[in-house]
Image (spheres, rainbow, N blue to C red):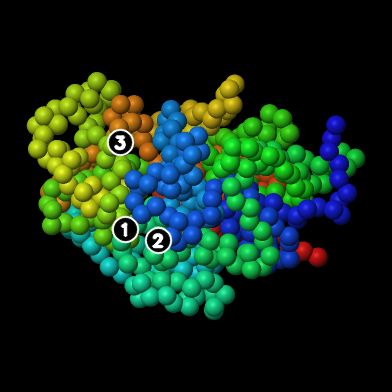
Amino acid sequence: MKAKANLMSYDYDYIIIGSGFGGSVSALRLAEKGYKVLVIEKGKWYRQNDFAKTNWNLRKWLWMPFLGFYGIMKISFFRHVTILSGTGVGGGSLVYANTLPVPKSTFYKSGSWAGLADWETELKPYYQKALKMLGVSKNPKLFDGDLALQQLANEIGRSDEFEHPDVAIFFGKENELTKDPYFEGDGPDRSGCTFCGGCITGCRQNAKNTLDKNYLFLAQKKGAEILAEQEVYQVEPIRDNDELKAYRVSFRAKTIFLKNSKSFTSKGVIFSGGVLGSVKLLLKLQKSLLPNLSAMLGDDIRTNNETLLSVSSLNQEKDLSKGVAIGSLLHTDENSHLEVVRYAEGSGFWKLLHLPLSSGKNVMIRIFKMVGQLFRNFGPYFKIYFVNPWAKSTTVLLFMQTIDSTLRFKTNRLGGFVSRVSKGKKPHPFIPESIALTKKYSEIIEGKATSFMLETFAGIPSTAHILGGAVMGKDASEGVINKNNEVFGYPHMYVIDGSMISANPGVNPALSITAIAERAMDQIPDKK
């Protein structure tokens, strides 16, 4: 039987599923327009002192509910990619590396959204709005890891392509509390960055401009409600005489054993749980309550064609943990760039999952090369794994390209979430340009390179930027949502998160998600 409801008795005007960049923007802008808004987030609230001091504190760092770990970073394993994503009130902003670049022109003219609007022109004011809201500044200081990248730029003849990135960090006086520097006193008090390198495990210095300090903070002041530690499992259309009028959103507790279900009704629903949240839930609902969702759902998923390789220095005078998470970047050619990523001193957990870097067409070749490296360089690798502090001596090199290939995610018979190649070649971690740059960087810092063990054993790359799956199109045959982010076939239902990204930005996507979310909210009129 179709659910019905008195249309004047909604619990909320809009329910937002997820509190990342898309959800946070939506919460504030809808609350400003006079709507009654609820944000439902499966992760926990994390205050300044709640974050893990190092990533050895797995309970506070990793999201693994089956082990009782309710931290801010989730690692998801698929056949074609390993995905790092964020969980908690503030979503990916809690764990991302703060960089907020504007993509190149090719981003706006490719993919399924090409031609739906003059995106570069139309989004320009929204990028500026997003930069202001997120408190972006140029990183003012370079440290050992950054200076090594600058030397690499000089050596390959691209010194002009080295830059201090735009980052969402408050660079005030270190350890000194300052009245809100961004919103004329309406925001929270802040403290200046100490350049400790702890951005990715969660900023304990009150300096990182996470969403709970801007969009979500202001949204709550405007009346938006945030319900943490609850996971949405059902979104049911409410019809009146076969006309879709509203939705019933059902959810249950995520972080306790007894998971009592609750539900609220709303006129509109916004999916903002990212690819791993929104797309997975929508694929499940497509088989039951939302059968009219586009067949494109789960398709056009991208990874930014990236690699994550680590280099550990044997020079104990270098401190590669000092600085912000990403303090420098180098445009290595017109399609690619390289970033230096760091963890705070003491965060050495990753060394348990890393092996000496090796590449090859099959696993036997890679293992043979890896074992050969261990024998030839036993002393250096012994120091890396057992003597030298990992984070202090190690830099992660993030290499990204705008070159495109896509995956398709779907649910299997057991309800699992699986991947397959959609277009182009399958992603792989052995990009020749990345390996060559890593070797040069290793020479500069007198170090040895390592990579995530799944790359060696399975040839599966890692990404922190999973995008697409609910892309824009001119109609349901080409996309899941229209150019205003509304789901085809379901009025007042929107997808506003990384899964809406319809082309490869080739850069960290947080700013683009924020800008597109700002534009989407601008299309919704004020509440009468």
**Occupied quadrant, residue 373:** top left
Query: Which three-letter amino acid code belongs to the residue tagged 1?
Result: Gly
Mark 3–mark 1 Cα distance, whole angstroms, equals 20 Å
CB within 8 Å, label 3 to label 2: no
* Residue 242 visible, this angle: yes
Q: Earlier in the sequence, mark 3 or mark 2?
A: 2
Q: Residue drawn at (41%, 47%), measured in percent from left and top?
A: 61
State the residue position of label 1.
197
**Is residue 174 toward the left or the right of residue 392 in the image?**
right
State the residue position of label 3.
353
Identify which residue, 68 or 135, lies in the foreground. Answer: 68
Label 3 SS:
helix
Circle 2 crowding by C-alpha within 10 Å: few under 14, some 14–19, many from 20: some
Label 1 SS:
loop
Image disc number at residue 333: none
Identify which residue, 472 or 178, lies in the foreground. Answer: 178
Image quarter in which the N terminus is found: top right
Residue 305 vertical position relative to residue 411 in the rendered view, above or below: below
* Residue 423 visible, this angle: no
Q: Position of residue 486 (x, y in %)?
A: 68, 48
Residue 290 vertical position relative to residue 330 in the rendered view, above or below: above
Image disc number at residue 204: 2
Residue 364 vertical position relative to residue 78 in the rendered view, above or below: above
Residue 248 vertical position relative to residue 412 in the rendered view, above or below: below
Q: Residue drawn at (83%, 38%), measured in percent from left and top?
A: 3
Q: Position of residue 39 (x, y in %)?
A: 64, 53
Comparing labels 3 and 2, the label whose residue is closer to the camera: 2
Identify which residue, 497 or 105, lies in the foreground. Answer: 497
Q: Position of residue 259 (x, y in %)?
A: 64, 38
